[in-house]
Amino acid sequence: MGLEHRGVTIWLTGLSGAGKSTITEALERKLRACGCKLEVLDGDIVRTNLTKGLGFSKEDRDENIRRIGFVSHLLTRNGVIVLVSAISPYRAIREEVRGRIGDFIEVYVSAPLEVCEKRDVKGLYKRARSGEIKNFTGIDDPYEPPLDPEVNCETHQETLDESVGKVIAKMEEMGYLPAQTAIAAS
Ligand code: ADP
């Protein structure tokens, strides 16, 4: 018997290299170990199927997020915990998706651009700086930070465990997970 929980979308937004995927993977491991019903929608993977063909103009980025939001909504209302990891640079579309889903926790995963660029996990900043990639968020494309996210993870000054702990604590506080210490300890 898995842990009793409610459906919710955990939406991780932030610059490339900020730590969205790393936090998502750690959260996934932890929640699966407790038997939660869970699905992960990773921006990079989604772009190879659900939103294949979309580019990086504002219109296409918004459409990408709208489709991810649509699927998240279907899952969330069926009791699934949905982890979305996507840069999702525009505030208005994030707010639109939040409004539609309702059960929604926005996690702003942040680190200064210099830190993300130094990490350069996928080598994309280098390619953006050299001009090989255009419209790269943070370099020559905008990122609009959330104004009032439920959770702030500042990954340049906290450990991965601390970041994950903050999200779990917020899920408990908002009643999506039963308040207990079992998850923290697992
Ligand atoms: P994104 O998915 O946002 O593009 P990644 O998760 O791929 O970013 O990369 C983030 C990098 O930052 C990883 O190399 C990770 O090990 C590192 N990192 C350092 N501290 C943290 C933290 N507290 N949370 C998440 N990632 C962190």
Image (cartoon, rainbow, N blue to C red):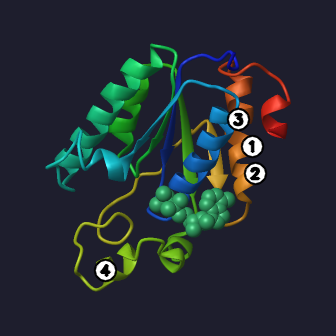
Q: What kind of residue is marked 2?
A: Glu
Spatial CA distance of label 4 from label 2 is: 31 Å
Q: Are marks 1 and 3 in contact (CB under 8 Å)?
A: yes
Residue plotted at (69% across, 18% down): 175
State which tag comes first along the sequence, 4 or 2: 4
Spatial CA distance of label 2 from label 3 is: 10 Å
Local secondary structure at mark 3: helix
Q: What kind of residue is marked 4?
A: Arg
Q: Are marks 1 and 4 in contact (CB under 8 Å)?
A: no
State which tag comes first along the sequence, 2 or 3: 2
To which residue does mark 4 refer?
127
- Where residue 158 appears, x then y in whole percent? 73, 60
Spatial CA distance of label 1 from label 3 is: 5 Å
Horizontally, residue 25 falls left or right of residue 63, namely: right
Label 2 beta carbon within 8 A of ligand 1: yes
Above/below status of 9 relative to 185: above
State which tag comes first along the sequence, 4 or 3: 4
Q: Are marks 1 and 2 in contact (CB under 8 Å)?
A: yes
Above/below status of 175 relative to 21: above
Q: What kind of residue is marked 1?
A: Gly
Q: Mark yes or no: residue 143 visible.
A: yes
Callout 2 crowding tier (Cα within 10 Å): few <14, some 14–19, many ≥20: some
Callout 4 crowding tier (Cα within 10 Å): few <14, some 14–19, many ≥20: few
Spatial CA distance of label 1 from label 4 is: 34 Å
To which residue does mark 1 refer?
165
Q: Are marks 4 and 2 in contact (CB under 8 Å)?
A: no
Checking the image for residue 168, the label placed there is 3
Checking the image for residue 162, the label placed there is 2
